[in-house]
Image (cartoon, rainbow, N blue to C red):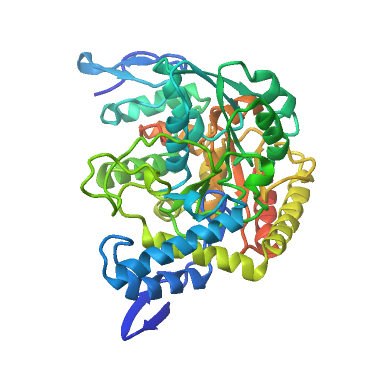
Amino acid sequence: MVLVVWRGCRIRKAVNQVSAAPRTVYLDNAATTFPKPSSVFREMIETYSFLGVSPGRGGYDLAIQAEELVNQVRGQISTFLGGDGPERVIFSYNATDALNTLIFGLVEPGCHVVSSRLEHNSVLRPLNYLRQQGVISMDLVPFNSRGFIEPRDVAAAITPTTALVILNHASNVLGTIQPADIVGEICRNRGIPLVVDVSQSAGTIPINMLAWHADAIAFTGHKSLLGPTGIGGMVLRRGLEVRPSRFGGTGVDSRDLTHVHEYPRRLEPGTVNLLGIVGLAAGMRAICRTGAGKIHAQEMSLVTRLRDGLASMDQVMLYCAESLDNHLPLLTCNIEGMCSEDLAAILDGDFHIAARAGLHCAPLVHEDLGTSPDGGVRFSLGPFNSSQDVDMVLEAFWKIIHRR
Amino acid sequence: MGLTGTLSISEDTVALDEGKEACFDDEGFLTDPELWHETLAEGMAKADGLPGLSDRHWRVIRFLRHYYLTVGKSPLNTELTRGTGLTLMEIEALFPRGIKYGARRLAGLPNPKGC
């Protein structure tokens, strides 16, 4: 039990409700990083306690100061992700929200969209909906046996009516980092907007939107950016016009019934998630203090240890993990003849290891791997994992394999 | 209510007493957990290759059903181990088709929708 005392408030924080309960080895950081750096909570509580007002709504000092803070974070994000300035950073609930805004704001009836079979449902479902409604047609490029798309396949899929190319930067199932810069060059030469989903990579892999020639990126705050859930956003290149699909209060021009045209308010109706924005900024600061490169190197060292250990067991099937170059610290695997959900349940219930089983909201990846409908078990490492955590997984696997 | 017909794993319905019919989804889970019956579980177990259900099988099945009917959801992994006195590895090994497709399905719990 940890007691947090702050300004006379006693906040009892039950780290382990039952002190005798063993610590869970958390290996689902691709879903959300856990735990977060303590500085994230501290900054959220401290800032929200004296500045928890509606940013930019009202002319009193606190409201103006809160808006200034939000705009500072926009600048921080733009710098962190290689964007085109703070006013082109738009906050959303999460990456799915941002991707929906981008997709619905960029496609026109009758247009064609290129995406990939590596995508998460945050892209596949909006696109499929628009296709079912007869609004768009689309082509999904495949991935190769190592888990990468081929830029030439993207080029070949582009048609005269292609209005959007949308790809993830890193697969949430395979961990493979896609050649966003090469695809960006293709799209720039063809004059087609490129949207990159950096949900899995932002915070662990350098993101440079402008250098990639990407027109927009969608990010979430609660994964490798180490912020809380409920905050995400998009960064737009200057000149990209995204039609708003939601309208409402923005704190300016209230007399006009037409929603404001200027960014970021054009795509940001309603009060922003100030608490989440503060936490996101604190998460990014925590990354910068340690260094994203250092964090990534440590995580890759651990995932390499995990890969090597699992690969030494004949009954374990690993997917696209022969090489861990251009890779996130995550692996997906199965034990021969065993349902992935059973494997994850055993890891959790018997060994206190939290890993994610199933299709990981990316059904086409599993379809192509041949692991559908049961999927696989994904291990995704984070900044707070250790070599002991990896060894516990390997020991558990050994026991599970030799259980009968 | 009991099982009047023979059961094969490929069937999507089974005739029960009182003119009722138990339906299964495409993965063999009962679509209506209320229609579960011990005889039905035994038939499903035979179709899975189990000659009979032992006391240990019934301990798991009864705990799953009791928990589901009482709480309205499946037990947590740790609750399942505490409630049965068995590890999940033991439960997985006990049923030829494992925990999800074996124990949980035989207990008549709904097909989990998580992915």
**Does residue A234 appear in the picture of this structure?**
yes
Quadrant in the picture for residue A64: bottom left
Task: Say left or right for B62 vs A78.
Answer: left
- A255 shown above or below A115: below
Q: Which residue is drawn at 33% across and 25% down?
A: B31
Quadrant in the picture for residue A305: bottom right
- B20 shown above or below A177: above
Horizontal and vertical percent for residue B3? 31, 19
Q: Which of A402 and A200 is in front in this view?
A: A200
Q: In which quarter of the image is the N terminus of chain A?
A: bottom left
Q: Residue at x 45, y 72 (%)?
A: A43
Q: Which of A17 and A95 is in front in this view?
A: A95
- A123 shown above or below B17: below
Horizontal and vertical percent for residue B107? 37, 35
Quadrant in the picture for residue A48: bottom left
Task: Say left or right for A49 vs A109.
Answer: left
Q: Which residue is drawn at 72% across and 46% down?
A: A327
Task: Say left or right for A316 vs A173.
Answer: right
Q: Which of A385 and A199 is in front in this view?
A: A199
**Does residue B55 appear in the picture of this structure?**
no
Horizontal and vertical percent for residue A16? 44, 69
Q: Quadrant of the C terminus of chain A?
A: top right
- A268 shown above or below A115: below
